[in-house]
Image (cartoon, helix red, strand yellow):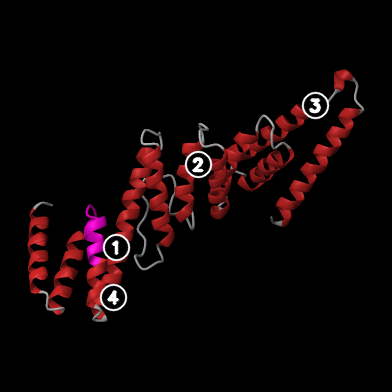
Amino acid sequence: MNFIKKKEFCLISILVASLILSGCNSSPEEEITIEMIEKDIYDQAQSRLKSGNYALAIVSLETLERQFPFGKYAEQAQSELIFAYYKNSSYDAAISAADRFISLHPRHPNTPYAFYLKGLARFTDDQSFFGDLPLLGDMTHKRDLSRAKESFDDLSEFLTRYPESEYAGNAKQRMIFLRNLIAKQEIYVAEYYIERKAYVAAVNRANYIIKHMSRTPEVAKALEISIIAYKELGKDDLAKEAEEILKTYKENI
């Protein structure tokens, strides 16, 4: 927690305590209830979310969760924390919050959205990757895509669980992007192995694309790599088979 957030949290905590104490000394007409304090903090969080002040919205929501863990707005605060963390570029925190929410509330109406945000946060190193557009800008295929693969798996689980979700269409588009991106990475690695004369490793990479990413544009390149590698390995029958598959593939695209 940075200094500003820590200071804000402390101020809110002091305010909560002072309001509770003042409520004890108030007349019935002026009594300040716990429910009123809880609602004030929740309303503050909503105002900050709507204004795009996600850092301070996080402070309000975290305070609400800590001070009123069984309150009226506790579950909603936990759900909105995932979104606030994500929009604040606190992706690891968003993933942790999503996992916690899913574990605590597996049948909550917001659980599908928690799965969805978890998938987005997994790979979003910066907001340029997963903005509001359904398909995102190009990326270098040389970067580490381990989180892209995790994101693909998360979004796949989301679609398996909630195929009729309002976010399903967007998730499918992002998965297409991720699948193409991962395929490009596999091609890059396979080509690297060809250059290093590591033909068995190159074939393994190429076959992975052919088997698991058959709907990507990289399949033709994967088959070409397989042909080269099989010929270098002296496996002419497999090379010929790959050539036939490549010919058929090109005729049908």
CA gap between label 4 and label 3 equals: 67 Å
Dot 3, crowdedness within 10 Å: few (<14), some or many (≥20)? some
Residue at 10%, 51% in the rendered image: 252
Please tell me how crowded label 4 is: few (under 14), some (14-19), or many (20+) other residues with Cα within 10 Å. some
Judging depth in this view, the residue of 36 and 204 nearest the camera is 204
Mark 3 vs mark 1, CA separation in Å: 59 Å
Mark 2 crowdedness (10 Å alpha carbons): few <14, some 14-19, many ≥20: many
Residue 157 locus on image (x, y percent): 40, 45
Residue 33's tag is 3
The question of residue 214 being in magenta is answered with yes
Find residue 245 and report its image quarter: bottom left
Spatial distance from mark 2 to mark 1, Cα to Cα?
29 Å
Separation (CA) of disc 1 from disc 4: 12 Å
Mark 2 lies on a secondary structure that is: helix
Q: Which callout, 4 or 3, points at the residue further toward the start of the chain? A: 3
At a point 87% along the width and 28% down the height, the residue shown is 23
Report the residue marked by disc 2: 114
| Residue 214 seen | yes
Disc 1 designates what residue? Answer: 184
Provide residue 169's location: percent of width, then percent of height.
Answer: 35, 39
Q: Tag 1 or tag 3, which sits nearer the N-term? A: 3
Please, what is the three-letter code of the amino acid marked with disc 1? Lys
Q: Which residue is mark 4?
A: 192
The answer to whether residue 64 is above or below residue 192 is above
Q: Which residues are magenta?
A: 206-217
Q: Which structural element holds mark 4?
A: helix
Q: Is residue 183 left or right of residue 249?
A: right
Above/below status of 152 relative to 141: above
Residue that sits furthest to the top in the current view: 29
Marks 3 & 2, CB-CB < 8 Å contact = no
Q: CA distance from mark 3 to mark 2?
A: 32 Å
Which is nearer the eye, 12 or 102? Answer: 102
